[in-house]
């Protein structure tokens, strides 16, 4: 059983890995792009990621989800991963971090 501090540390490690995964069509990582709505872990190290895509009909969605699954499940301590793909609220540019907006010339 994990302590609260250990769970928070695991969530930080997951976010770090997510920041190394880039949207196939936009040169910004999926975390700063605002595609990740929530990362949670429970006491048994089961991970839930609630996320969206820039468009519901993204042709590269499967490859992106496969990459997320492969990289997160290989983090030490992660027992299982559930990715919940949602489209409500729909993604828009306001969800991007300031860094992402700067990188893409929106600031």
Image (cartoon, helix red, strand yellow):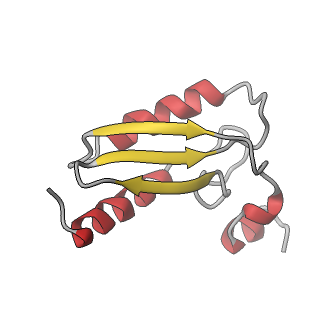
Q: 15 or 37, which is in the foreground?
A: 37
Classify 82 as above or below 37: above
Classify 37 as above or below 25: below
> On the rendered structure, is 31 left or right of 15?
right
Q: Position of residue 25 (x, y in %)?
A: 73, 39
Q: 65 or 23, which is in the foreground?
A: 65
Classify 71 as above or below 19: above
Classify 102 as above or below 19: below
Q: 22 or 76, which is in the foreground?
A: 76
> On the rendered structure, is 51 left or right of 10?
right
Q: Residue at x 22, y 66 (%)?
A: 6
The image quadrant that residue 54 belongs to is top right
Q: Position of residue 37 (x, y in %)?
A: 60, 55
Q: Position of residue 2 (x, y in %)?
A: 18, 60
Q: Is residue 19 visible to us here?
A: no
Q: Is residue 48 visible to us here?
A: yes
The image quadrant that residue 46 belongs to is top left
Q: Residue at x 55, y 47 (%)?
A: 50
Location of the C terminus by quadrant is bottom right
Q: Residue at x 47, y 55 (%)?
A: 39
> On the rendered structure, is 38 left or right of 56?
left
Location of the N terminus by quadrant is bottom left
Q: Position of residue 60 (x, y in %)?
A: 67, 27
Q: Residue at x 28, y 47 (%)?
A: 75
Residue projecting furthest to the right: 106
> On the rendered structure, is 8 left or right of 67?
left
């Amino acid at each position: 059983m994990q302590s609260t501090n250990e769970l928070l540390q695991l969530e930080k490690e997951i976010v770090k890995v997510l920041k190394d995964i880039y949207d196939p069509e936009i040169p910004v990582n999926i975390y700063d792009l605002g595609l990740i709505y929530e990362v949670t872990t429970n006491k048994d190290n089961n991970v839930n990621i609630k996320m969206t895509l820039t468009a519901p009909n993204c042709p590269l969605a499967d490859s992106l989800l496969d990459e997320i699954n492969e990289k997160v499940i290989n983090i030490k301590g992660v027992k299982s991963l559930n990715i919940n793909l949602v489209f409500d609220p729909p993604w828009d540019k306001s969800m991007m971090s300031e860094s992402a907006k700067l990188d893409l010339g929106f600031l």
